[in-house]
């Protein structure tokens, strides 16, 4: 897809659904420009399009060591792709999502949908926590609060 087609299909501020995000394979030199698709882990997520980004995808070449030529590894670009920048909450980070992994929100034309076209996304998306994790966190916090110093009225004071 070209940039104009992407901007026409997914305009700025539109609501989209996705279940895979595109991340860099690693932070090392060898994998800095190799991308993989990772499941979001929370099923299908709803987000808002905040922009597009062009990334060059390729691989690293390692020439055979020759002491006469001081040539190190070099990057060989294969193609450049456009990704959507999607936020799932106003204070969450931007996620890069491939255009093929996104589906736009479908609207039925009526007066109420025109009024409510721009749905609210949460201020901050917080991953759901399991009951077991909640109980463990509660135990840790209770034990930690027992060691915190208090004044004669039972209020917590700074250490």
Image (cartoon, rainbow, N blue to C red):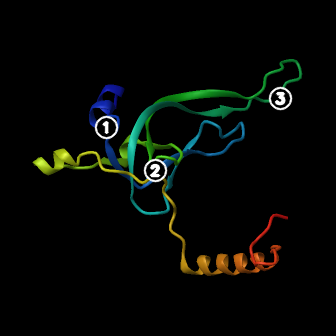
Q: Residue furthest top?
A: 68
The residue depicted at 79 percent of the width and 67 percent of the height is 157
Residue tagged 3: 65
Measured Cα–Cα span from mark 1 to mark 3:
47 Å
Local packing at callout 1 (Cα closer than 10 Å; few below 14, some 14-19, many 20+) is many
Earlier-in-chain disc, 2 versus 3: 3
- Nearer to the camera, 44 or 38: 44
Measured Cα–Cα span from mark 2 to mark 3:
48 Å
Residue 134: x %, y % from top left: 59, 77
Residue tagged 2: 89
Front: mark 2 or 3: 2
Q: Report which quarter residue 24 is drawn in.
A: top right
Element assignment for label 3? loop
Q: Report which quarter residue 139 is drawn in.
A: bottom right
Element assignment for label 1? loop
Earlier-in-chain disc, 1 versus 3: 1
Residue 125: x %, y % from top left: 48, 56
Q: Residue furthest left?
A: 110
Residue 11: x %, y % from top left: 31, 34
Residue tagged 1: 10
The residue depicted at 27 percent of the width and 36 percent of the height is 9
Please, is residue 118 above or below residue 76 in the view?
below
- Nearer to the camera, 59 or 126: 126
- Nearer to the camera, 99 or 142: 142
The residue depicted at 23 percent of the width and 46 percent of the height is 117
Residue 154: x %, y % from top left: 76, 78
């Amino acid at each position: 897809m070209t940039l104009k087609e992407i901007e026409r299909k997914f305009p700025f501020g539109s609501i989209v659904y996705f279940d895979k995000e595109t991340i860099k394979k690693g932070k090392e030199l060898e994998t800095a420009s190799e991308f993989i698709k990772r499941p979001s882990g929370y099923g299908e997520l709803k987000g808002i399009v905040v922009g597009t980004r062009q990334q060059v995808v390729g691989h690293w070449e390692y020439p055979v060591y020759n002491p006469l030529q001081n040539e190190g590894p070099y990057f060989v670009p294969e193609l450049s792709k456009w990704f959507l920048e999607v936020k799932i909450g106003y204070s969450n980070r931007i996620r890069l999502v491939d255009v093929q992994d996104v589906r736009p929100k479908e609207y039925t034309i009526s007066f109420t949908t025109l009024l409510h076209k721009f749905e609210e996304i949460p201020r901050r998306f917080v991953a759901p926590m399991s009951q077991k994790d909640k109980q463990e966190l509660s135990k840790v916090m209770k034990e930690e609060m027992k060691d915190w110093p208090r004044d004669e009225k039972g209020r917590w004071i700074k250490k």
